[in-house]
Amino acid sequence: MIDEILEYNEEFVKNKGYERYITNKYPDKKTAIVSCMDTRLTQLLPAALGMKNGDAKIIKNAGGIISHPFGSAMRSLLIGIYELGVDEILVIGHTDCGARYTDSQGMIQKMKARGVEQRNIDLIKYYGIDFETWLGGFLDLDQSITKSVDIIRNHPLVPDTIKVYGLVIDSVTGALRRVV
């Protein structure tokens, strides 16, 4: 796959395919979006929101979750707010999310099947990582979105002036539904 990518990229640059994407690092709509890494959302999400390249900072992870107030997604939001001018945050979950029903115990079994040794799993547990929370999914989509919105709204480093909303996008049609 990497050879295909590099070959394509060489032609892309040579033909100046990048020109239609030129923008700067500041989001034109002063918006950050936290959403899922689901491949169906790669083009559907910005299209359904009427966003073009340069309009928003998009932070993607499994489930579109703020899982920890001092994790990488929250760090990205804080950088967006204080360094890049973000003043509005959208947390957007989606229908039929693959991360929703993730079973941490099942994932551990898959890790072992691919060569991860039990001692490494035990070591991670020893350092205080709760696999159920860290790798597990969520049962209620709206509740998951609300929890992430609450973490952002109540974060001690997020100013009260930042607007935070939670939505669900239909992963087929792009229809949006406001949660909070």
Image: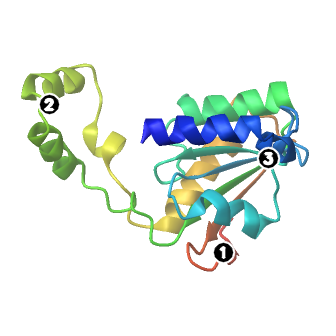
Q: On residue 174, which mark appears?
A: 1
Cα separation between marks 1 and 3: 17 Å
Q: Position of residue 178 (x, y in %)?
A: 70, 71
Q: On residue 104, which mark appears?
A: none
Cα separation between marks 1 and 2: 38 Å
| Residue drawn at x 38%, y 65% as measured from the top left | 139
Secondary-structure class at tag 2: loop
Q: For mark 2, what is the residue?
A: 116
Secondary-structure class at tag 3: strand
Camera-side residue of 15 and 41: 15
Q: On residue 56, which mark appears?
A: 3
Quarter holding residue 72:
top right
Q: Amino acid at mark 2?
A: Val
| Residue drawn at x 72%, y 30% as measured from the top left | 78
Q: Is residue 154 visible?
A: no
Q: Amino acid at mark 1?
A: Gly
Cα separation between marks 2 and 3: 38 Å
Q: Position of residue 147 (x, y in %)?
A: 55, 53
How would you rate the neighbour count of disc 2 (Cα within 10 Å): few for under 14, some for 14-19, many for 20 or more?
Answer: few
